[in-house]
């Protein structure tokens, strides 16, 4: 391979049902990306499937996304560098455009625009995301939720990924608004849970990750990654009457997940990964 356009680190724990979709869309046959899939503590054929697409595969028995991200960093060299969740759908051309934006600067971090595919989700889940996707936190240069790209200088902002739950929260908090950008004309697709119970589980995990970050960060350092400011979010929603009928669902999910996350942080409830299996298709042969 000549000098690659950038590198891609994909942590993957038992992702045989989605890794083919992820890698097919990146179009690795073009040979211009340095792609490493870190199969961490897998009990399925994620590694074999990834190798079949031409990705470099690193296998480890050690569980945990942070360890997988760090291990992936050790096996790639090119910048800009993308960190991509295996269950995210991202077209290779869009990824290459985001890599180019970061390469040219001045942004230190970038991501495609987020698209949430709720076609298979129940109505409470659709209602929740109708509000969530209208929030400034999501619409104004969101970094995270499945993919982000860092420049060499951006990656130099930290040494290793924290063992805390939310790597995207941690990374977003490292950059001021003027240092990160959402790239117009590109998008990535996330596939949310189908059921309300599964939604509550993953949003509890997300809130727990934010709470972990706030607890471990220096005073004043967590605001950039902690979610939408209530005042700006309220103003945005007031201008969007189409989302008003969905507000009770959004509020109820927010209250329930906040209570659950606080219980976990206090040690009164078990800390589980809360993996969503409802949105994942069955693996193909």
Image: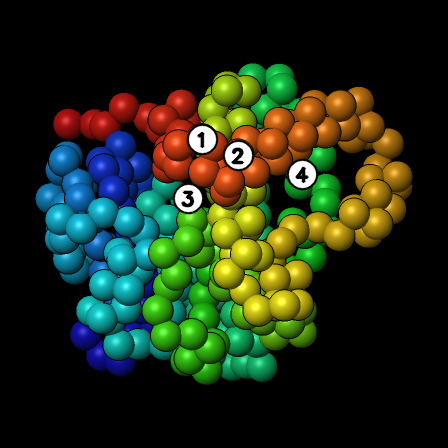
Contact (Cβ within 8 Å) of mark 3 with mark 4: no
1 or 4: tag closer to the N-terminus: 4
Circle 3 residue: 89
Circle 4 residue: 132
Q: Secondary structure at mark 2?
A: helix
Q: Which quadrant of the figure contains the N terminus?
A: bottom left
Q: Is residue 204 above or below residue 112?
A: above
Q: Position of residue 224 (x, y in %)?
A: 64, 62
109 relative position to 43: left or right: right
232 relative position to 146: left or right: right
Mark pair 3, 1: CA separation: 33 Å
Q: Secondary structure at mark 3?
A: strand
Mark pair 2, 1: CA separation: 6 Å
Circle 2 residue: 263
Circle 1 residue: 269
2 or 1: tag closer to the N-terminus: 2
Q: Is residue 157 above or below residue 270?
A: below
């Amino acid at each position: 391979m000549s000098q690659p356009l950038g590198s891609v680190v994909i942590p993957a724990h038992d992702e045989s049902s989605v890794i083919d979709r992820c890698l097919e869309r990146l179009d690795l046959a073009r040979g211009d990306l340095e792609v490493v899939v870190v199969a961490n503590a897998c009990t399925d054929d994620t590694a074999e499937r990834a190798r079949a697409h031409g990705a470099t595969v690193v296998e480890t028995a050690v569980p945990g996304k942070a360890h997988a991200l760090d291990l992936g960093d050790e096996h790639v060299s090119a910048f800009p560098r993308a960190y991509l969740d295996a269950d995210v759908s991202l077209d290779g051309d869009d990824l290459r455009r985001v890599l180019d934006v970061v390469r040219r600067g001045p942004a230190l971090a970038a991501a495609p625009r987020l698209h949430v595919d709720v076609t298979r989700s129940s109505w409470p889940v659709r209602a929740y995301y109708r509000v969530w996707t209208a929030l400034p936190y999501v619409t104004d240069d969101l970094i995270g939720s499945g993919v982000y790209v860092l420049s060499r200088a951006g990656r130099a902002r930290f040494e290793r990924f924290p063992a805390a739950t939310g790597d995207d929260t941690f990374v977003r908090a490292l950059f001021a608004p003027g240092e990160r950008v959402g790239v117009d004309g590109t998008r990535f697709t996330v596939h949310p849970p189908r059921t309300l119970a599964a939604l509550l589980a993953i949003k509890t995990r997300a809130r727990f990750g934010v709470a972990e970050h706030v607890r471990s960060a220096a005073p004043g350092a967590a605001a950039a990654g902690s979610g939408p400011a209530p005042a700006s979010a309220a103003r945005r929603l007031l201008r969007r009457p189409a989302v008003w009928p969905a507000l009770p669902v959004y509020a109820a999910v927010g209250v329930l997940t906040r209570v659950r996350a606080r219980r976990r942080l206090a040690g009164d409830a078990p800390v589980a990964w809360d993996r969503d299996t409802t949105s994942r298709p069955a693996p193909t042969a």
